[in-house]
Image (cartoon, grey):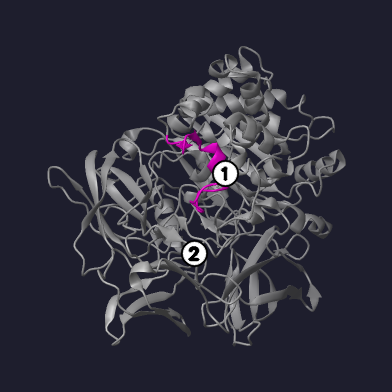
Amino acid sequence: MGFMMLRYLGKALGHAIAFGFLLISAAAASIAAGPTVHVSVKAKEQFGNPLTYDWRVTDGRIIAKNGASISWELPAGKGLHFAYVLISNGKGGYTERRIVVSTDSIGTPPEVRPDRDFAAPATTPPAGETYSAILRSGYYVSPLSNPSTSEEEGVYTPGVEAFLKSKTGFKTPVVKANLSGVISIFDVPPGAYRLMCRMDKALPFAVCNTGVKIDDEAANDPFVGPQDGRNEITGRLLLADGSPCGAEFGLFGVKSAGRATLFDNTGAVLAGPYTVNRYGHYSFGLNPLSTAVPATILLECEGAKASIPVPDYLNFVSARTLLGSTAAPDVFAMSAKLNGVDVGQYLPPPAGLASDNVDINNFYLAAKGLDSRMSACRYYLSIGAVTRCNSDGTFAGAISFRDWKRKMKMKPFLPAGAVEAEATYINRVDLNLTRNHHSVANNNRTAAYVCNHLGPTDETQQAVNTAINNAKNGRNLVACVAMDFSVSPGVNGNKPFVRFLIFGPSGELLPSVNLDGRGEKFVPGTCVACHGGDHYAGRFPETPLGSPGAGPANIGAHFLPYDTGNFSFSTKSGLTEADQEEAIYQLNQNVLKTDPPAGVSELIAGWYQGSHTLDKDYLPASWQAQSDLAKRFYHKVYAKSCRTCHVAFSELLNFDHFDNFQNSASPVHEDGNLRTSVAVCGGSSSWLRTFSMPNSLRTMNLFWESAGTADDQPKIVEEFAGISNNRGGCTLTPSPAP
């Protein structure tokens, strides 16, 4: 249970155990300042373009900036703290890096601030649900894996205007697609709609989707839009090193993109300028010309430009352009020093892993969408965790971890006679962190939190024992994630709902986390990537609380089951799996008190069946009548790499019910084969979908690293899904993603 927290620290921080990380007291939030460290970065750009530097820290504060260096006042107390730098060359090249500093041995004592009560503010129930879609134009893009070819995928198109229109004439407000081509329309009343959209204000709105249905859950439509492929120019703009022009960095609030404009031979604008998407693709929409005429494409990326002649518009399909003299900056080192002594650990992105095959920033743990600093603040405001959102998305009046514990009646506020279940283990399959879980269920309220500590440095039992021992002795704390299922008067029809909160090592509320070394991701999107989110689609609204389209406090998320088959335990007395069996049973029983979806409740019931010992060989009834190969697929692939998240999703994606996996009418199919063959094994023209599962970096790596072993997951998928040889089988091939 608990949402996926700080995914990638593993090997990058493994040797940092020598720092002697110590757990802070979660009983207090810090208001005092800690030591000040000097942080610097060394970088250059291969063409010698001058570089600029922007900095952010997860906690503490920056008290001075000087280009490639900052002075960083760390928070009081003990824990791990992260500083980020975003480096730009002024011509569309960006590189983000981070460093971690431990205050376990250099920190100052924390101070206790006054208690703060909290409650979600009463609001008018939303008028409807959220609708999200990816809008695309054109049919052709050139994949990076084979730039000489074009594939029928289309361009995910920024700036497209769209709205929903019902048969009765009701219209939603017009919205614009973001740099990923995604739109989100909030507060849509239940009913049937048409999606209307246009690429350009000079064009009329046209029907993009006739079958939009809004009911009691959020709706997602992938890959719809003003698509026409006739005589359409589609291209790709990249820097000289093959990286996309510009970038989107949520932590820094940076949204940089190129522009594409189509001119005739007299210099008159025929189409555009249109925004280049975050992957470097652009399209000129719906056939602005009907005859072959000479034309020119002007491509601009901040301070860089390039022109492409188009001698025959009608036969021009796709162009791939590399801008000269611009590239993403190279970072060589980062350091953090206190009184001249290095106290930091530089954390470059992970490399040499199967997950490197998908080279899209913020790809993992983003299956349902990505939030911003402002939407994270609006979410916290809706659940009562903050009192105000500032104009830049920072928040004020935040509760502390201690405040939340007091409200939930957890230790040290546990009432006499109440029981707080606790278990400690390694969640080796999804995060590889050492997790200390706590859960209570009383007074019609269920609350739980998990404090995440560094995981083992390797796969040996000795490393597992060491990591768990460190956690139990208060070392290596990263952050704590809290969840509760409770009632807030005047909210959600006075019915209980699930909310998420992230607390830093000093007990302060945090808006975002870096789960996999690929950038900070904001709540609640990074939570619902695994925890469901029936009322979430794409992004929590940035609209002020109480205004039309404001997000609901209840995003329809769920507690997750505790699957010991995917955990590693210590062999030390008191911490073995057998020693903690009863505690884990109680943790799972508390999950059943949170009104979980059928997939979760059926799984927990199937695990125990009158016993307090979890049955790791459990097989759902609908799978028991299937072939031996199907049963092997369930145990060796689905239960390991998919089940924990999928049982918390909508019924169509609950694959504990075999019919949902096999039913030809289900959207999990593509081209007559199970979608597994696309999302897991590739082979699709949709480079955004191919190799998209598992949507956790660690899980994906373990899946592909099993190839050639006795539990070869790709081979089992290949055999079970019936992937033909002419599709390459289930093989990790170079991704077409940028």
The label number, if any, that marks residue 279 in the structure image: 2
The image shows residue 554, relative to residue 226, as above or below, that is above
The image shows residue 17, relative to residue 266, as above or below, that is above
- Image coordinates of residue 63 in percent, x first then y, are 59, 78
Camera-side residue: 274 or 153? 153
- Image coordinates of residue 585 in percent, x first then y, are 64, 23
The quarter of the displayed image where residue 581 is located: top right
**Residue at x 63% of width, y 41% of height:** 730
Q: Which residues are magenta?
A: 667-691
Q: Is residue 523 visible?
A: yes
Camera-side residue: 30 or 268? 268
The quarter of the displayed image where residue 243 is located: bottom right
Count of numbered circles in the view:
2
- Residue type at numbered disc 2: Tyr
Query: What element does badge 1 sit on?
Result: loop
Q: Is residue 327 left or right of residue 155?
A: right
The image shows residue 623, relative to residue 644, as above or below, that is above
Camera-side residue: 72 or 250? 250
**Residue at x 84% of width, y 30% of height:** 573
Q: Is residue 53 left or right of residue 173?
A: right
Q: Is residue 179 left or right of residue 340?
A: left
Q: Main secondary structure of the magenta part?
A: loop
Q: Which of marks 2 and 1 precedes in the sequence?
A: 2
- Image coordinates of residue 224 in percent, x first then y, are 34, 51
Structural crowding at the residue carrying mark 2, measured as other residues with C-alpha within 10 Å and reported as few (<14), some (14–19) or many (≥20): many
Q: Quadrant of the N terminus?
A: top right
Residue hosting label 1 = 693
- Residue type at numbered disc 1: Met
